[in-house]
Amino acid sequence: MKKYKVLFATALGLALTAGSALADSTIKMVEVITSPPRTEFLKKQIAEFETANPGVKVELVSLPWGQAFEKFLTMVQAGDTPDIVEMPERWLALYGANGQLEDLGPYMAKWKDAATLGERAKEFGSVVGGKQYTIPYGYYLKAMFWNKKLFKEAGIDHAPATLDEFVESAKKISAIPGKYGYCLRGGPGAIFGMNMFMNIANGKGGYFNADGTATINEPGSVKGLETLAEIYKNGYAPKDSVGWGFNETVTGFYSGTCAMLDQDPDALIGIAEKMKAEDFAVAPVPAGPNGKSYPTLGYSGWSMFANSDVKDDSWKLMETLLSPQGNLEWAKMVGVLPIHNGSDQDAYFKTEQFKGWFDELNGGDKYEFVTPPTHLENLGNFVDQIAIKGFQEVLLGKRPAKEVADEWAAYLTKEQQDWMAKNKK
């Protein structure tokens, strides 16, 4: 019996194989952006794959997102590597730069569905050494959820179009007893919303200047960080939001605790289940003093470890999940924008619910999308540890925003300039 290792989030394999003969091969798969509904949906897709491929079993391992970076790193360091892993963009360089991931280019060359694969998927999946170390399964693009009922109660009839309007709206709504203007995210994943507001205030997208110096401590960026700190200190965001991650911010919004939330399409799933469609809307992210906005565009995908001894079966599973139909179903379930050309014409996406995201996508030069610097090997450490600690210190008034931003800039500048030195052409 071959041993196929593919770690794929949540304990799945046992139920699927109960009462059946032992599999001829086993794929070990790890899921890291875990939630019960998406894991159950993933199990359904895996079950369909197993039915279509007798003798192949998939072991799914789900890691809690809040501890996923450290837990998965520990697994890899212990030699417990999967065949397939869900790969957030900021982990890609860590595992791709040292050859731990399989180059998927040769597989894609023979993949019939590559014909409709969007160029962004090819581009984003090959940022490390020009090799296709991952195939994104969808894109996370930030837009602004706003609670129409709370806005009306505060005497406001539209979503904020500028950063100044955003702060003023948060102030007015927070004057309502027991309500807050903004669902601030100070815990896991905080950097992307934080950096977005820093870019908006700075009037410059991205993370680096041409010489590799970080922009995160430029005067405008620091002002953006200070703006978020003032929102928190003035009580325009819940006190415990200093530790909030994805689930807490989404709950804060649909419960009516806070009236604005910058989030990706994945938040729409839970919100739409809890709120009436007429009570909320999704608008583009507010613009800064220069009239432009810089929404964060992130992505995650599926990657294969190079030491897998079941690569053919692993790829077969990946191409099933990433097929136009499989990806469209997955995108609807987990809340991402799909990867295949033409998917946006599906009736599911042609609704008012998705208007904010598509206004950004179709908004021309007014919106400049910012993707994380996934080519940096230590980006995961910065995103999941260093940035969160510093942001919380600023929010709680323990350290000045400029001091923390300078610390971040020193770290990022070294990472970027080291990368530039190694990749001189």
Image: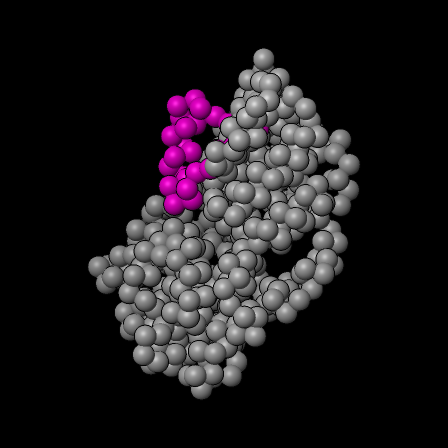
- Residue 158 relative to residue 74: left or right: right
Span shown in magenta = 58-82
Most extreme residue toward the bottom is 155
Residue 375, percent across and down? 51, 41
The residue that appears at 53% across and 46% down in the rendered structure is 38
Which quadrant: the C terminus? top right
Residue 353 in view of the camera: yes
Asked where in the image residue 219 lies, by quadrant, the reply is bottom left
Name the residue nearer the viewer: 342 or 298. 342
Residue at (40, 47) in percent of width and height? 383
- Figure quadrant of residue 101: top right
Q: What percent of the width, then of the height, locates residue 99?
A: 53, 27
Residue farthest along the top direction in this orientation: 1
Q: 144 or 45, which lies in front?
A: 45
Q: In this rendering, does residue 402 appear at all?
A: no
The percent position of residue 396, horizontal first and vertical second, equals 25, 61
